Image (cartoon, helix red, strand yellow):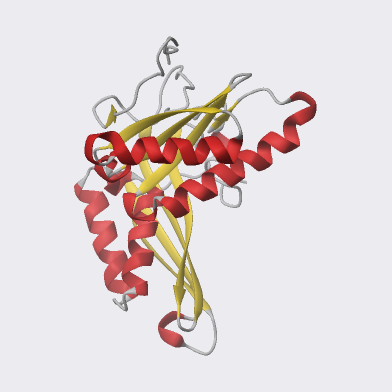
Amino acid sequence: MGQKTNPIGIRLGIIRGWESNWYGGRDYGDKLAEDHKLRKYIFVRLAKASVSRVIIERTLKLVTLTITTARPGIIIGKGGQEVDKLKEELKKLSGKDVQLNIIEIKRPELEAQLVGASIARQIESRISYRRAIKMAIAASIRMNAEGIKIQISGRLNGAEMARSESYKEGRIPLSTFRADIDYALVEAQTTYGKLGIKVWIMKGEVYGKRELSPLVGMSLSSAKSKGGPSKGRKQRRR
């Protein structure tokens, strides 16, 4: 079962927290669609900022967005101008007050989304996919990843018949629920069509009870908050 299911979804509630935290009731469908719209907008709007995750929390009149990124300076801008502009855009999109928290990722080589996006950019720049993948694997292993697996599918090198190739180093125990495995699926657009890139990164094993906060899996040493609560509102403990 662990080989077929999504490695993140199967670990929710065990060692990993949810990226959307709110109660929807009868409006569940509308809020879910709004979450999708907000995430899509942020990933497109901040394509150059190396965004890994967007965590959404809701209260009655406030939407709190926590963005994890390897390049927080691009989001914040000079004197905070860019982050204020982004906040206004998201406020218009959601129709509610928006609070933004920016978390800096210290080791992007251990974030599956960022590793996949880096490979996709190199392929779109006509760099050999084998070279891009091997460089990504070497970088992750240097950052003490216990294992990494990358699978690429599509018309590789413009071949007429699509195929898949996998590259692996270390261990990826997908059936071990205590294994902290990050996963991402990224697409690269080439002149021959789209290539699908799947990335699994094994960070270690979790023993004992783990707090299922929205930022579970990100240690304090690898994350730094760049945004705070709005005036007149206390920041909730995580």
Q: From the viewer's perspective, is residue 39 above or below residue 57?
A: below
Q: Tell me: 119 left or right of 233.
A: left
Residue 38 horizontal side relative to residue 110, left or right: right
* Image quadrant assignment for residue 134: bottom left
Kindly tell me whether residue 9 is visible in this rendering.
no
**Is 125 in front, or is 128?**
125
Q: Residue furthest left?
A: 142
Which quadrant of the figure contains the C terminus?
top left
In this view, the residue in front, 58 or 80, is 80
As displayed, is residue 88 above or below residue 127? above
- Compared to 170, does 29 lie above or below? above
- Residue 144 at x, y = what percent? 23, 42
The x, y position of residue 60, in whole percent, is: 63, 19
Give me the residue at 38% from left, 65% from top. 120
Rendered residue at 72%/37% (across/down)? 30
Q: Position of residue 80 (x, y in %)?
A: 28, 34
Which picture quadrant has residue 115?
bottom left
Q: What percent of the width, then of the height, locates residue 44?
A: 46, 54
Q: Residue at x 43, y 18 (%)?
A: 208
Toward the viewer: 144 or 233?
Answer: 233
From what the image shows, is residue 129 above or below residue 5? below
In the drawing, does residue 25 fall left or right of residue 201?
Answer: right
> Does residue 42 appear in the picture of this structure?
yes
